[in-house]
Image: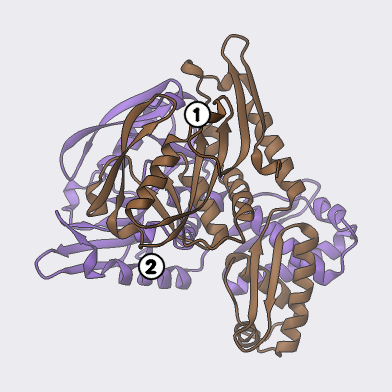
Chain colours: A purple, B brown
Amino acid sequence: MKKLKRSERLVDMTQYLLSEPHTLIPLTTFAERYSAAKSSISEDLAIIKDVFENEGLGELQTLAGAAGGVRYIPKLRRDHALAFAEELCRQLQQSDRILPGGYLYMSDLLGQPSLMNEAGKIIATAFSDREIDVVMTVETKGIPLAYATAAQLNLPVVLVRRDHQVTEGSAVSINYVSGSHKSIHTMSLSRRALKERSRVLIVDDFMKAGGTIQGMVDLLGEFNAEVAGVGVLVESGAVENEERLLQDYISLARLSDVDAKTKMITVNPGNYFEK
Amino acid sequence: MKKLKRSERLVDMTQYLLSEPHTLIPLTTFAERYSAAKSSISEDLAIIKDVFENEGLGELQTLAGAAGGVRYIPKLRRDHALAFAEELCRQLQQSDRILPGGYLYMSDLLGQPSLMNEAGKIIATAFSDREIDVVMTVETKGIPLAYATAAQLNLPVVLVRRDHQVTEGSAVSINYVSGSHKSIHTMSLSRRALKERSRVLIVDDFMKAGGTIQGMVDLLGEFNAEVAGVGVLVESGAVENEERLLQDYISLARLSDVDAKTKMITVNPGNYFEK
């Protein structure tokens, strides 16, 4: 790379850090990349750190010493996160979302990459201090949110299938009870997808009684893996507390009522904003 | 926002532009955001443009006049794209990927958000000049690539389901013939997911004879929508040309042989690199 001026370095370092979240980058990487002294790089990083923190983009952690460097931890500031959740609630309350059976049409929202990325940033922020090896979801609609979360945390995604697929090799299958219908389903995970003793963040788009997520928790047991956390975009609050299989999770929005007669949908920011 | 120095402005403008690809941002947005003169903003943009272009991050298009502004078009430079494809091929050739029936285990690669983002950038680069309204894929494994592509193009994603789901409302279903097995399957798309006359970029993880993608093309016909392009991560070249249902597509890698006996897999960069 040709020798850059400070102004040019700042542009390139900013894009570099944003593209490598949760990754320790030694100062020498930058010093060599720009043929610059480490002291200059440190000054650059101080400027970037200030802007990132003032703008609520996240933290720039600097680690001193021979094994030191800099690490960008994306974090969405609470006020930004709440504004996002309130806008999400507003959109979820549009009465034409009501489908037969009291289901809510959400595919238009789940189909917006920028919206999924913001939601993923919030879940990543909530779990940024946990030790996590992998993000898990079950097909289909939670996939974009799981990838958005994993991208922010610099983690791989493990995808649980509803059926055993030929392209997954040998797999472990379990049955689970979907809480809202009390009906029995199967989910399956490729043997080679998950290492033993992995710490797993479970992400999904929607949770009612929590049967599907409990299924994933049970599946983790088969792999001697651990739940590091659970994050969902929308939880249905229209569930008696004793019916909820799972207590420890975060939600960005809570659907408390769908009235098919009056076409009224009630959605409020989720439990993440109560803590 | 407090008044920033040029160095701070450059950091913030860089992250702003990166987070809003394919979006026209009026210079006044920046001028107001930083309480700075438009002439200063223009100088800042010239610096960012130089770095982005030298680093192969994409173009910064500046449009003059009252309706003018700046637009970031992410583009992955050809040499970077080819290096990525060669590394992908190397990983796909690992012999332990061979599954019964000659299938290839790819879920570990598809589960890496950073890899999907790079691949999505290449497909977005290939189609950056086309007029496209929406990216379409069919569940399940193409979803992360479709979202990665759509994020770069600032477009929504429309997801075709294998079965008609209660959460999708009324839907249009079609049957299609999966070329490699000549077996008949169903795919279905929510009526409200796609506007008439939309221009659609189809993205998938794998294409053999092309039956699944042809199914999506047929489904578009039901919505009076048009194919704007087709991009796949891996195509199987082990198909006679006359058997290939689809001729106009780009692939990032081409799988030409899987020999279960010798455990040899042959993968080369796809047709995108031949053009």
Residue B243 image label? 1
Q: Say above or below: B90 vs B122.
A: above
What residue is rendered at 29% in x and 48% in y? A247
Please state, as top left, top right, bottom left or bottom right, where the N terminus of chain B lies in the image: bottom right
> Where residue B235 sits: x, y (%)?
56, 34
Distance CA(mark 2)–CA(mark 1): 49 Å
Give the farthest residue toward the front: B242
Residue A85 image label? 2
Residue B209 image label? none
Instruction: Give the structural element (helix, strand or loop) at label 2.
Output: helix
> Where residue A127 sits: x, y (%)?
48, 52
Q: Say above or below: A22 vs B105.
A: below
Dot 1: within a 10 Å radius of its alpha carbon, few (fewer than 14), some, or many (20 or more) residues? few
Q: In the image, is A137 to the left or to the right of B268?
A: left
Q: Relative to the observer, which residue lies in front, B35 or A47?
A: B35
> Where residue B71 sits: x, y (%)?
63, 72
Chain label for disc 2: A
Please state, as top left, top right, bottom left or bottom right, where the C terminus of chain B lies in the image: top right
What residue is rendered at 48% in x and 31% in y? B209
> Where residue A20 sits: x, y (%)?
66, 52
* Callout 2–callout 1 Cβ contact below 8 Å: no
Q: Relative to the observer, which residue lies in front, A148 or B194?
A: B194
Dot 2: within a 10 Å radius of its alpha carbon, few (fewer than 14), some, or many (20 or more) residues? many
**In the rendered image, is residue B140 in sight?**
no
Q: Say above or below: B69 vs B73.
A: below
What residue is rendered at 17% in x and 36% in y? A183
Q: What amino acid type is highlighted by mark number 2?
A: Ala
Disc 2 vs disc 1: which is toward the camera?
A: 1
